[in-house]
Amino acid sequence: MTAQPPIRITIVDDHPLMREGLRALVASLPDIEVVGEAGDGDAARRETQLTRPDVVVMDLHMPGTNGVAATRAILRAAPATRVLVLTMFEDDDSVFAAMRAGASGYLVKGAQQDEIIRAIRSVAAGQAIFGPTVARRIIDFFTHGPRPAADPFPELTAREREVLDLIAAGRTNPAIARHLVISPKTVSNHISAIFTKLQVADRAEAIARAREAGLGL
């Protein structure tokens, strides 16, 4: 009987120690092979295009392109690749944003090692897998409906949130200035502050984050 080729994985996390720990975890397993690593979403997309792994183990909150946007980009470029989220965040927004982006699994950091290995194997086999706390959130969501939404992006001022909402709706800077009756320079200042606070690199990424949070729709 011919042995199955190993499951090829790429590890994406902005913490080198986390990447090293995951690499060490699978090093002794004959059926899983690490073929790439990345420290942010852009690098993850490039690494995936180069190595075409079976599974990307993806952190969500990273500098630059976040894990949700990276998941979406990876699955567009490599539809056969599966994404398993492994993150410290288990709030509803993070869970459902990852699911909407196409993630096949979601675990919270702190999961047992055998749970992580089992999840990698399950996702590679085409199954959906969720850690116990995440599964409870999903069940609760479909049983009781969404919880009352808090203001998205509490780190933004009310005016910055208003500008972000208009950006997500596709308004240009001059159109935002006219709508809010402020100068184009003030609009640019607000946008710069938004980019800094949300740790996004450009307008497209800010729009993606805003729409994930329900703005601009």
Image: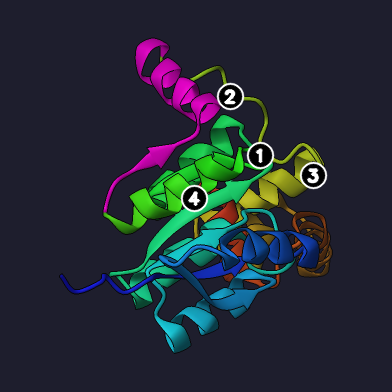
Q: First in sequence: mark 1 or mark 3?
A: 1
Range drawn in magenta: 126-144
**Disc with the residue nearer the chain's start (2 vs 3):** 2
Task: Inspect the magenta stretch and tell me whether residue 140 lies in it.
Answer: yes
Residue 136's place in the image compared with 176, above or below, is above
Q: Nearer the viewer, mark 2 or mark 3?
A: 2
Residue at the spot of label 4: 117
- The residue identified by callout 1 is 89
Q: Which residue is mark 3?
A: 156
State which mark lies toward you, 3 or 4: 4
Relative image position of residue 65 (x, y in whole percent):
63, 68
**Magenta-highlighted stretch: main secondary structure?**
helix
Q: CA distance from mark 2 to mark 3?
A: 16 Å
Residue 113 — which label? none
Q: CA distance from mark 1 to mark 2?
A: 17 Å
Are the residues at dot 1 and dot 4 in contact (C-beta closer than 8 Å)?
A: no
Q: Which residue is mark 2?
A: 149
Q: Which of 115/89 is in front? A: 115
Of the residues under marks 2 and 4, which one precedes in the sequence? Answer: 4
Is residue 72 shown left or right of residue 4? right
User: Mark 1 Cα within 10 Å, few/some/many (few <14, many 20+)?
Assistant: some
**Eye-nearest disc, 1 or 3:** 1
Q: Relative to residue 34, is residue 162 drawn left or right? A: right
Look at label 1 and name its amino acid.
Phe
Judged from the image, the secondary structure of the residue bearing numbered disc 3 is loop
* Rendered residue at 76%/63% (across/down): 195
Q: Are marks 2 and 3 in contact (CB under 8 Å)?
A: no
List x then y, in percent, for residue 83: 43, 58
